[in-house]
């Protein structure tokens, strides 16, 4: 999977699951606020990422994640081994 | 001084209709809600018979967080409660201003439990179960979800009393209001319908296997009954003190006069005559009405050989020569289990309002016990002013409610 493919898939599944406007999901947009996520929702983010990428995130992985780009970088690193 | 307790709202989501108008029509016309779920046979069920209830579409009604926490019986309960609140004239402002409670009967949530355990076994990672599963899995799922959805601030817990759960929930709401501890309580019962909820029940051989004619399978009191038909859905009643209802100009649909209860102290699954008899007598005593004032008895009768026989004996013993009309609406709905005690109050209320008694479908020939009762197998266009509703459950739990037209 290319990095662009990963980014597109993340944006698509998050928008669909959390019923967000896809246009609001931009690299610099804040992840939590844009998707209106609370701590319970983060559990579902973990499930979604596992289902779609086979990657298992843990709570500490979210430390420092502010924007969608931060999150894309995390997943790309886990899937492809680098940003 | 004890408060008088009235019903000011009702809502129903069942296999004979998904709102009051549809259900009223089904009762009037004697329509069965029973069908087949072939997938049950693939799972090893002895019987594919079940009440058929469409799944509500809630995407435009509730946000994602609220939806992911709701199991199917919670969805049914949400629909029934929306209808009940609407016709009780209760809106969000009222709920915000008052301490309205919720007491709901529910005694299982099998599908999310099984689904969650399956994931843990496969993934060996509990996080993969997702955020909604715990809230769907607990017995208190209906009350915990509806109290959040409707911002309820009064009493809040679930009543688990097997197949009498819904009836006990209404009874508990009645007692809290009668004693002045609550002004208004949303109460009812909910029952899941899915592939897993009644598998172990099916394994006991308790279900009818008359699969060639689903509408004829549930035949309470009939000599040739061969077991119950599992069903489900949800029913909600808004129960309120007369003073509260009068003050806000609410529609008063009926008055709860009495609640009786008892435990058989006997076999875990085989009912007896003594326990139900004591429950019926207690309800009559609490209501302060004579047996001649009960125009209609909505029986628990589920279409099992021993259960119907013993209930018929109990009713016949209590009512003697009075012989009020007795039917089991389970002949149309199947056994709505945790929901039944509440839904059967709704069904009886609709009949009392409409001046008719729905037929006890499939009652063709009585046995030694049911022949002692006055059981119509066609609709009776007769009015009645008060009814008695029985609900019994595993472990020998019994509940009886008496409701009268308000005057």
Image: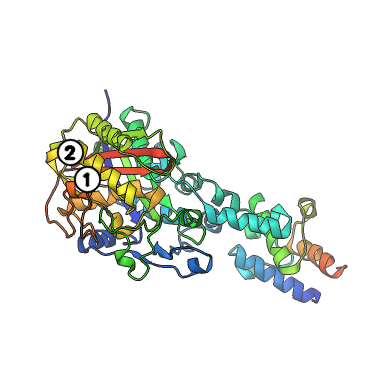
Query: Does A71 appear above or below B165?
Result: below
Residue B87: in sight, yes or no? yes
- For the N terminus of chain B, the quadrant is top left
Query: Does B110 appear above or below B45?
Result: above
- In the rendered view, does B18 fall on the left or right side of B204? left
Q: Kindly report which numbered mark, 2 or 1, lies closer to the viewer in this rendering.
A: 2
**Residue for badge 2:** B319
Q: Position of residue B236 (x, y in %)?
A: 35, 48
Task: Assess disc 2: are there few (<14), some (14-19) or many (≥20) residues with their C-alpha within 10 Å of its C-alpha.
Answer: some
Q: Position of residue B253 (x, y in %)?
A: 23, 45
> Residue placed farthest to the front in the image?
B368
Q: Position of residue B280 (x, y in %)?
A: 26, 36
Query: Does B379 appear above or below B271?
Result: below
**Residue for badge 1:** B297
Query: Disc 1 sits on a residue from what chain?
Result: B
Q: Closer to the camera, B72 or B149?
A: B72
Q: Closer to the camera, B73 or B117?
A: B117
Looking at the rendered structure, the secondary structure element under dot 2 is helix
**Of callouts 2 and 1, which one flags the residue occurring earlier in the amino acid sequence?**
1
Looking at the rendered structure, the secondary structure element under dot 1 is strand
Q: Closer to the camera, B232 or B322?
A: B322
Contact flag, marks 2 and 1 (Cβ < 8 Å): yes
Q: Position of residue A5 (x, y in %)?
A: 75, 76
> Residue placed farthest to the top in the image?
B1
Task: Assess disc 1: are there few (<14), some (14-19) or many (≥20) residues with their C-alpha within 10 Å of its C-alpha.
Answer: many
> Residue placed farthest to the right in the image?
A82
Query: Disc 2 sits on a residue from what chain?
Result: B
Residue displayed at 59% across by 49% down: B134
- In the rendered view, does A26 fall on the left or right side of B62? right
């Amino acid at each position: 999977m290319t990095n662009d493919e990963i980014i597109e898939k993340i944006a698509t599944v998050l928008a669909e699951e959390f019923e967000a406007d896809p246009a609001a999901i931009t690299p610099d947009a804040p992840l939590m606020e844009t998707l209106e996520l609370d701590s319970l929702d983060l559990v579902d983010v973990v499930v979604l990422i596992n289902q779609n990428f086979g990657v298992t995130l843990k709570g500490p992985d979210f430390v420092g994640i502010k924007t969608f780009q931060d999150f894309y970088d995390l997943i790309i690193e886990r899937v492809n081994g680098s940003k | 001084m004890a408060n008088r307790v009235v019903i000011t709202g009702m809502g129903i989501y069942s296999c004979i209709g998904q709102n009051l108008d549809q259900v009223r029509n089904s009762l009037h016309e004697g329509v069965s809600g029973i069908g087949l779920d072939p997938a049950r046979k693939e799972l090893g069920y002895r019987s594919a018979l079940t009440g058929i209830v469409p799944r509500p579409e809630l995407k435009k009604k509730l946000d994602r967080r609220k939806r992911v926490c709701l199991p199917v019986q919670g969805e049914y309960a949400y629909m029934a409660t929306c209808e009940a609140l609407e016709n009780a004239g209760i809106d969000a402002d009222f709920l915000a201003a008052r301490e309205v409670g919720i007491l709901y009967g529910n005694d299982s949530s099998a599908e999310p439990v099984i689904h969650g355990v399956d994931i843990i076994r496969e993934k060996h990672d509990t996080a993969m179960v997702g955020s909604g599963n715990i809230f769907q899995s607990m017995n208190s799922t209906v009350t915990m979800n509806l109290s959040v959805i409707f911002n309820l601030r009064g009493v809040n817990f679930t009543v688990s009393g097997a197949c009498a759960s819904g009836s006990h929930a209404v009874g508990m709401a009645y007692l809290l209001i009668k004693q002045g501890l609550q002004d208004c309580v949303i109460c009812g019962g909910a029952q899941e319908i899915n592939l897993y909820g009644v598998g172990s029940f099916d394994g006991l051989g308790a279900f009818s296997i008359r699969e060639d004619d689903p509408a004829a399978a549930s035949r309470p009191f009939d000599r040739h009954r061969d077991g119950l038909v599992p069903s489900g859905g949800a029913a909600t009643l808004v129960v309120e003190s007369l003073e509260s209802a009068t003050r806000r100009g609410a529609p008063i649909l009926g008055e709860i006069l009495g609640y009786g209860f008892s435990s058989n102290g006997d076999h875990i699954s085989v009912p007896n005559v003594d326990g139900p008899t004591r429950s019926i007598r207690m309800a009559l005593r609490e209501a302060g009405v004579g047996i001649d004032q009960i125009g209609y008895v909505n029986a628990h009768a589920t279409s099992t050989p021993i259960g119907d026989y013993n209930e018929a004996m109990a009713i016949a013993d209590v009512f003697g020569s009075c012989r009020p009309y007795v039917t089991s609406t389970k002949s149309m709905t199947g056994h709505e289990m945790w929901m039944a005690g509440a839904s059967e109050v709704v069904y009886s209320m609709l009949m009392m309002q409409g001046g008719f008694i729905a037929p006890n479908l499939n009652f063709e020939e009585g046995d030694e016990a049911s022949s002692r009762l006055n059981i119509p197998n066609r609709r009776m266009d007769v009015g009645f002013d008060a009814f008695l509703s029985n609900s019994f459950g595993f472990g020998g739990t019994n509940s009886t409610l008496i409701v009268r037209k308000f005057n």
